[in-house]
Image: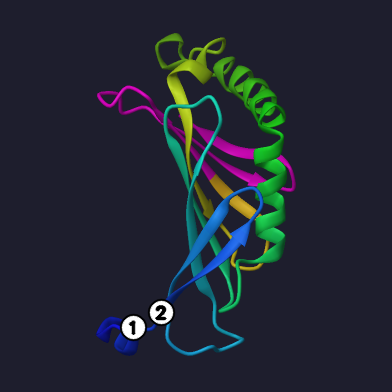
């Protein structure tokens, strides 16, 4: 056993059929009421970069409701992309032309880069789409609750 494991605790792993090995923060004592952070970098097929996923959970595993919601999202990414298309179109109607996001080819310019939980107990998240172009400072962020996109910014 390593000295860091004795002092700070061990990282645990949880195997998921969609995301693979999900790793916890260091867990020193198995306290059932304490929340722990779990993370995984998931490679999405046909993309150049992976998506960093953060989940909340207990000392045994990630939060079941959060995990199942994200499995559903990642198994149905075309549904998410369609919802994003609709939301981007709505936003573009209300902003100046120089601030508009390219509606038709945003999928070629951005990738699903990160997922952060908004609520410790509920399957509510912030999704982030980052530009493939490292020189660009434009990102797409939105809240995802109950299958709906809210508060999108870019």
Q: Secondary structure at mark 2?
A: strand
Residue 76 rendering spot, x and y as whole percentages? 71, 34
User: What residue is rendered at 59% in x and 14% in y?
Assistant: 93
Disc 1 packing (10 Å; few <14; some 14–19; many ≥20): few
Q: How many marks?
A: 2
Residue at 48% over, 54% down: 40
From the viewer's perspective, tell me whether residue 68 is left or right of residue 10.
Answer: right
Q: Give the magenta-colored segment's residue range.
A: 127-154
Identify the image quadrant of the N terminus.
Answer: bottom left
Label number found at residue 141:
none
Q: Is residue 63 visible?
A: yes
Nearest the camera: 40 or 125? 40
Q: Is residue 60 magenta?
A: no
Q: Is residue 107 above or below residue 40?
A: above
Residue 135 position (above or below residue 97): below
In this rendered view, identify the residue nearer to me: 128 or 48: 48
Rendering coords of residue 56 (x, y %): 56, 66
Instruction: State which quarter of the image contains the C terminus.
Output: top left
Question: Residue at the location (47% across, 15% down)?
Answer: 100
Q: Which residue is mark 1?
A: 5
Rendered location of residue 79, percent (x, y): 72, 29
Q: Is residue 137 magenta?
A: yes
Q: Is residue 92 above or below residue 139?
A: above
Please indicate, yes or no, whether residue 95 appears anywhere in the rendered image: no
Query: Label 1 near label 2: C-beta < 8 Å?
Result: yes
Question: Disc 2 and disc 1: Cα gap in Å?
Answer: 5 Å
The residue that mark 2 highlights is: 10
Residue farthest front in this picture: 1
The prevailing secondary structure element of the residues shown in magenta is: strand
Q: Is residue 133 above or below residue 38?
A: above
Of callouts 2 and 1, the N-terminal one: 1
Q: Position of residue 94 (x, y in %)?
A: 56, 18
């Amino acid at each position: 056993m390593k000295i860091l494991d004795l002092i700070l605790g061990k990282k645990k792993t949880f195997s998921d059929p969609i995301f693979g090995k999900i790793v916890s923060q260091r867990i020193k004592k198995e306290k059932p009421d304490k929340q722990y952070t779990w993370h995984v970098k998931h490679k999405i097929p046909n993309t150049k970069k992976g998506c960093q996923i953060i989940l909340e959970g207990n000392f045994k595993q990630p939060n079941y409701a959060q995990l199942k919601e994200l499995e559903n999202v990642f198994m149905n990414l075309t549904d998410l992309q369609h919802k994003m298309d609709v939301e981007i179109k709505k936003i573009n109607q209300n902003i100046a032309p120089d601030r508009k996001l390219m509606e038709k080819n945003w999928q070629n310019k951005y990738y699903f880069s990160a997922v952060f939980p908004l609520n410790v107990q509920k399957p509510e998240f912030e999704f982030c789409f980052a530009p493939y172009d490292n020189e660009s400072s434009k990102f797409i962020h939105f809240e995802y609750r109950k299958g709906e996109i809210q508060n999108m910014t870019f």
